[in-house]
Image: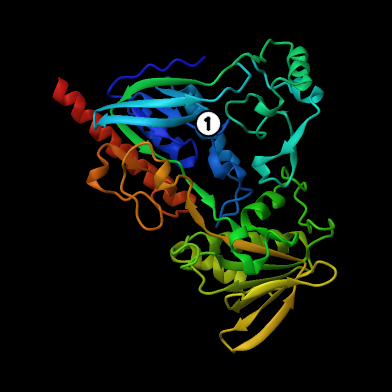
Amino acid sequence: MTEVVATNETILVVGGGISGMTAALEAAETGKRVVLVEKRPFLGGRVSQLYKYFPKLCHPTCGQEINQRRIKMNPNITVLTMAEVTGLEGEPGAYTATVKLTPRYVNDNCTACGECAKVVEAEFDNEFDYGMSKRKGAYLPHVMAHPMQYVLDPRIIGTDDAQKAKEACKYDAIDLDMEEREIQFPCGAVIWATGWKPYDAAKIQPYGYDRFENVITNVEFERMADPKGPTGGKIIRPSDGKEAKNIAFIQCAGSRDRNHLFHCSRICCMASLKQTHYVVDAYEDAQVTIYYIDIRAIDRFEDFYQNVRAMDNVSFVKSKVANIITDKDGNPICRGVDTEGYHRYENTHDLVVLATGMEPSVSKSDFPVDIVINREGFIEPDPANGGVFAAGSASDALDVNRAVQHATGAALKAIQVVNRVAGAEG
C-alpha cells in the first residue's frame, strides 16, 4: 500500500505520459517532492504505444527506459498508478488533492513471472493495441511496463479465474481483497499532464471506419507496424490477413473541420510520412497514396517530407477525400476530386489509414477544479488557473519534442509557486 508523504511544497503531477514523467523528473531533480498520478496501470502514456519517432525513425524505448529508471531511483517521486485525481481544493501553495485508487489486485511482491496469466482463461480486448489484439484477465500491460507488475482485470474478480491466478502465484502477490480507496494529501502546485486521445474516427461517417474492416486509424496502424504489436509487425488487411501493399493515408481525418475538430493537430502529416516509411520498407512493390489538404512539415521536418515526396512509389493527391466505399472483395475505394487538376477519382486500395487528430484526454466537465479551457478543449495559460499548469498535450496538440520542452517549462512554473510558499513561511 503506497503511503503519500506530502506538504504544501509538494508538486502534484497528473498524468504519467512523456510530459508528466518529464515534469516530475525536472521538479524532483531540483529537490522538490513530487507525487505522480497516472490513471493507467503503467507510466509512459501514448509514447509507449509508438513504434518509432519521426524524423529520425528511432525507437522510443530507449528514452522511455532511461526516464523510468530515473523515476525509480529518485526518492523524491511517489508514483501512484491506477489513480485518478477526483478533487482539488484550496489555492496556490495550499491545495488539498483527493485521489481515487483503483485496485490492481496485485501487490509489490509481484516479480512479473507470468504464472497467473498462464492459468487464467478469460480474454479481453487489449487496450494497449487499441483493441486489435486480446489479452488475458491477468496481464502485464506491455513489455516495458513500469511498474513491472501484473494486473487482474476487475471483470474476473469473483470468478474461478481469479482464484486460479491466486493459487498459481508463488510469491503471494495476488490480493483479491483489495478495494477502491480514496486518499487526500496537501500540495502547493499542480501540473496537469493528462495528454491526448485520438479523435473518434467512427464519427466521420463518410469514411466508414465503423463499417469497413480495411479502414483503420493512424494509431492502430502504428501498433500494427510494431514487431511487438498485434500482427508481429506485419502490415496486413484486418479483413483477411493478406499483405497490404497498396495503402492510402487520408490526412486531416476529422481535423480542420467545424463538424469535428476545429484545429490542426500538427503532428498528423509527419506521422503519416513516418508510416509511409513502414510500408515502403516492408514491401519492395508497395504503393502509397497520401490524400492531403496541406502538408505541415515545417523547420527541421522539411527534409523528411521532401525525401518521402521523392519516392517513386509514393503519390500525393491534394484532395479532401469525399467518401469511402468498398468493392465485393472488401477493398476500400477513395472517392473525391483532385483540387490541383479538378479530376474526379475513384482509387482502390488494400488498406486506408485515417490520420485522425488529437484532442484532450480530459473534457472540461471532468476537471476537478475550475480551469480556463479554449475552444479546442486545451488548457489556456491563464492567471485564473492559479497554481495549476498544463504540460505537453494538455495545453495543445504537440509532438513529443515540443511536449517535453513544454513540460519542462511547466515544472519551472510549479517550482516557482512552491518556492514562493517556502519563502513566505521562512
Give the amino acid at mark 1.
Gln
Q: State whether residue 305 is above or below residue 125.
A: below
Q: Would you call the spot at circle 1 few (<14 residues within 10 Å), some (14-19), or many (20 or more)?
A: some
Q: Is residue 422 toward the left or the right of residue 370 in the image?
A: left
Q: Is residue 216 toward the left or the right of residue 266 in the image?
A: right
Please tell me which residue is depicted at 38% across the width and 36% down the height of the picture: 368
Task: Please state the horizontal and vertical placement of residue 369, each as a whole percent of the image.
Answer: 33, 37
Please tell me which residue is depicted at 29% across the width and 35% down the height of the picture: 414
Using the rendered view, name the quadrant where residue 87 is placed: top left
- Residue 31 in view in this figure: no
Task: Please state the horizontal and vertical placement of residue 404, each as a whole percent of the image.
Answer: 43, 45
Using the rendered view, name the quadrant where residue 421 is placed: top left
- Quadrant into which the C terminus falls: top left
Q: State whether residue 45 is above or below residue 327.
A: above
Task: Please state the horizontal and vertical placement of residue 315, each as a whole percent of the image.
Answer: 66, 76
Please tell me which residue is depicted at 62% across the width and 57% down the height of the picture: 218
Image colouring: rainbow
Task: Please state the horizontal and vertical placement of residue 243, each as a whole percent of the image.
Answer: 82, 60
Q: Which residue is mark 1?
A: 68
Q: How many marks?
A: 1
Please tell me which residue is depicted at 64% across the width and 57% down the height of the picture: 217
Q: State whether residue 211 is above or below residue 327.
A: above
Task: In this rendered view, identify the residue nearer to me: 385 or 52.
Answer: 385
- Residue 378 in view in this figure: yes
- Looking at the rendered structure, the secondary structure element under dot 1 is helix
Q: Is residue 319 toward the left or the right of residue 172 in the image?
A: left
Q: Is residue 273 toward the left or the right of residue 331 in the image?
A: left
